[in-house]
Structures are given as structure tokens and as C-alpha cells.
Image (tube, grey):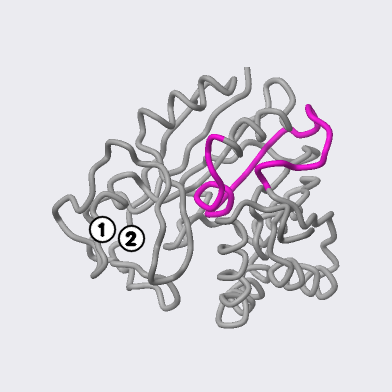
Amino acid sequence: MSLFELPEYAVRNRASWTKSNEEYTHEQGIRAWRQEHVTWGLWGIAESELNVLPDVAGKDVIELGCGTAYFSAWLARKGARPVGVDITPAQLETARHMQRETGIEFPLLEENAEDVPLPGDSFDLALSEYGASIWCDPYKWIPEAARLLRAGGELLFLRNSTLSMLCAGLDGWHETLQRPQRGMHRVDWADENTTEFQLGHGDLFRLLRESGFDVLDLVELYAPEDAKDARFYHSDAEWAKKWPWEEIWKARKR
């Protein structure tokens, strides 16, 4: 994929994730591939506790913004037929390295999750755990997920909670609001030279409905009582024990 085919924010994010893969996500990806049970988010909350995944055995799954594709590997172990999509070659190479090591193989596409060159109505589940869910423009990737899904297919994605974004400041997380919710959409982080996309609940709910989805659930995730700040990410375990750090949205295509 040519850099010139990507939006400017995607080019910047790809450069950031290339660097991150050298520093820590390659190592993290390898550890996650070797893990056999499904967990969610920064605090590694077990799927067995949340029960948000549908039965994936025999299902076609597309992971949008797959990174090192460990989540797709977990689903493949459960009998799914995953396809991973990401724009960062370095992270996809980590995924291919682990495919060779584990023998778990599935297609990996170096493509933008906002515009995937695959036929519509091809998948039973579209998934994003901190991939397209925050690094792609929701007004592009959510309608694209709807196009890729068959009728009755489900969309499942994890992102930062709205509240955690409103309380995030340059010096960490606060117990008071640090930015307005009105107009939330694009967030440019000058210190990391990256761009995220975050919508408030009302805007996101309406976007999902307008894209052809019925919202099934919204699961808010807190840090466990024994959680510590994550080594590689900006985090605040004590804050996250009191307010939701992340949230999982679950929707079904009408």
C-alpha cells in the first residue's frame, strides 16, 4: 500500500506504530499469541467474565486494525475463520512470525480499515480491540464494517470510555473534566504525533443506528482491585478502579 493512498492521520499513526512495534508491541504481541484464553483491554479482563463474544466456531471474522493479530489468533483457536486488516507492515510481520511459530494461519491484509478491498456481506463478526475503534475515523470505518457484515452479523469493538477521554489531561487522569464533550471527534496528541478518534455516547449511538446497526450492549470496564499501572501504556490504575477506563460496544446489523 502506498503512503499516498492513506489519509494524513493514518500515515502519521502508521509511523508511530512502526516505532512502537520496535519498542514494545512486538514483544507484547508474541506474549499474547502464546496466550490461549481471550482477554479484553489494558487490564486483561477475561472473556469468561464478560461473555461478550458470540459463538465464533465456523464463523467468518474480520479484525479491523488488527495490529499483531493476537485477537484473531485467539478466535482461530475457537474455530473462527479470521481475516486481519492493518496498515502497519511491522505489526503484520510480527503476526506472520507468530503464525509460523504456532501454525495458526489466516489471511493478513495490509489495508486501511476505512476502505477494505473485500466483497460486502462476507463476514459474521467484525471486531476491533483498540484498532479501527480509535485509530480510524468512525464516520468511515463503522459504515465500512456494516458493508462487510452479513445481515444479522455482529460488530464488537473496545475503545477508551468517553469519561476517561474527558478526564485525560497532558499530565495524566483527573477527577475533574479536562475537555468538553461537545464536538468530540478527532483528538491529535502532539506529544506522540498520533491521531485518535473519540465520539460521545450519543453521537456514537446515532452513527451505529444510521449505519444499519441495532445496539445490543455497552459494557464498561474497570481496572481490577489488584491492577497496577501498565508498563508500556499511559495508564492510571487507581483512577480506573473508580471510573470506567474502557468500554465494549456490541451491535447487530439489521
Q: Are marks 1 and 2 in contact (CB under 8 Å)?
A: yes
Stretch in magenta = 113-139
The picture quadrant where one finds residue 153 is top right
The residue identified by callout 1 is 241
Name the spot of residue 46 as percent of width and height, x first: 50, 55
Answer with mark 1 or mark 2, whichever residue precedes in sequence: 2
Name the spot of residue 225 as percent of width and height, x first: 28, 63
Residue at 46% of width from left, 47% of height from top?
Answer: 197
Q: How far apart, in angstroms, are the residues tagged by discs 1 and 2? A: 7 Å
Label at residue 224: 2
Q: Nearer the viewer, residue 27 or 171?
A: 171
Q: Report the side of 210 relative to 219 (left or right).
A: right
**Nearer mark to the viewer, of 1 and 2:** 1
Residue at 44% of width from left, 70% of height from top?
Answer: 192
At mark 1, the secondary structure is loop
At mark 2, the secondary structure is loop
The picture quadrant where one finds residue 218 is top left
Q: Residue furthest top?
A: 254
Q: Is residue 130 magenta?
A: yes
Name the spot of residue 147 as percent of width and height, x first: 71, 28
